[in-house]
Amino acid sequence: MSLANGEGVMEVEAAAAGDRSDDNVVIHLNDLHFTYCGPDGLPLRGTPPLFTGLDWKVEKGSRVLLIGANGAGKTTVMKIMAGKHMVEREQCKILGESPFHATDLTSSGRLSYIGGTWQRDIAFAGYNIPLQGDFSALKMIEGIQGVDKARRERLVKVLDIDPAWRMHTVSEGQRRRVQLCIGLLKEFEVLFLDEVTVDLDVLGRADLMNFLREECEQRECTIIYATHIFDGLEAWPTHLAFFADGEMKINEPSSSFPELAEGRLVNLVAAWLRDHEKEMESRPKGQKREFKYLSNNGWGSGRSNLTIKLSSNAVWRC
Ligand SMILES: Nc1ncnc2c1ncn2[C@@H]1O[C@H](COP(=O)(O)OP(=O)(O)OP(=O)(O)O)[C@@H](O)[C@H]1O
């Protein structure tokens, strides 16, 4: 670029200003494209891509409530941001790095993802078997190396974990508490929480949310929390993000919503969902859409959860 004319100088200044305004951005989705693929690694024919150019920036220290209807794509986008699905490097940056490629982000604990139930696939036993075994909660928790002892003790207290619990006899809620403790042991910089409070009792949930809020305030870490349970959450988020149709429809600071101060978060969310439903209903039906698939995002947790929609399933019968 030539700096000889005034235009060039202005362009450089504008670029520098843009860089500066991004200094605090820790989560950056930039024209994100994503499609779930079939067993052959190709997009399922006729299935629309989930994201076709999703942009999102989140600043350091934010606590974002990620809101959206069932199937909107919250889990998928969180998994992409947690490095569990491969996308092009430039399309997803967490703490300045591509989370799929920069494995040190997750191994160091700087980026933590806690979601789903705590399950694994076990040969001959089946898929999604809850993690269990005749070992104690303490053994699991102490198995995580490089953790500050005071932090560990605090978390065990906050989550009200009895170190003597045997993991094969605990309830769902107790198992969830141990999962949360393990996910929070390291001092994360960015945390993705995907509907993890469903099994917690009211006090357990309140204590956890207070702990997370303190973490953000004291250490300036960033949390994205996807949930459908909004009771008592009004004072927690710094931002609300409403996600629908593969787009971030609303992404605003909490101060923009008087409903929060009035304790009516659930009404606000219900209105967004209803408006979106109406918008979908008013769209012309039966229109054939052309889909453009930009990249293949092959990760599928070791097995296919997909419906095979090919015209022939001969391969699968042989
Ligand atoms: N492994 C998969 N293979 C193919 N499609 C999938 C897979 N996982 C999810 N999907 C589809 O992607 C879409 C988004 O799912 P996702 O789980 O991200 O939504 P969500 O917003 O988290 O929903 P919920 O609120 O119900 O948890 C859904 O239409 C779902 O059917």
Image (cartoon, grey):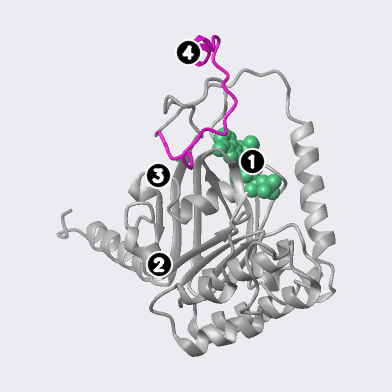
Residue 159 shows in this picture: yes
Q: Which residue is mark 1?
A: 245
State the CA–CA distance, disc 3 to disc 4: 26 Å
Residue at 48% in and 11% down: 318
53 sits to left or right of 167: left
Answer with mark 2 or mark 4, whichever residue precedes in sequence.
2
Can you tell which of label 2 and label 1 is closer to the viewer?
A: 1
> Was residue 308 drawn as part of the magenta stretch in this picture?
yes
Quadrant for ligand 1? top right
Identify the amino acid type marked 1.
Asp
- Residue bearing the label numbered 3: 86
Q: The residue under label 3 is which amino acid type?
A: Met
Quarter of image, res 157: bottom right
- Magenta residues span 296-318
Question: CB atoms at circles 2 and 3 under 8 Å apart?
Answer: no
- Given this view, does label 4 or label 1 mark the residue nearer the observer? 4
Picture quadrant of residue 296: top left
Find numbered disc 4 in the image and state the secondary structure of the residue it sits on. Answer: helix
Q: Main secondary structure of the magenta part?
A: loop
Q: On the picture, is 3 further left or further right than 47? A: left
Dot placed on the residue nearer the N-terminal end, 4 or 1: 1
Label 3 CB, ligand 1: below 8 Å?
A: no
Q: Looking at the image, is mark 2 or mark 3 earlier in the sequence?
A: 2
| Residue 228 coordinates in the image, percent (x, y) | 74, 57
Q: Does label 3 or label 4 sit earlier along the sequence?
A: 3
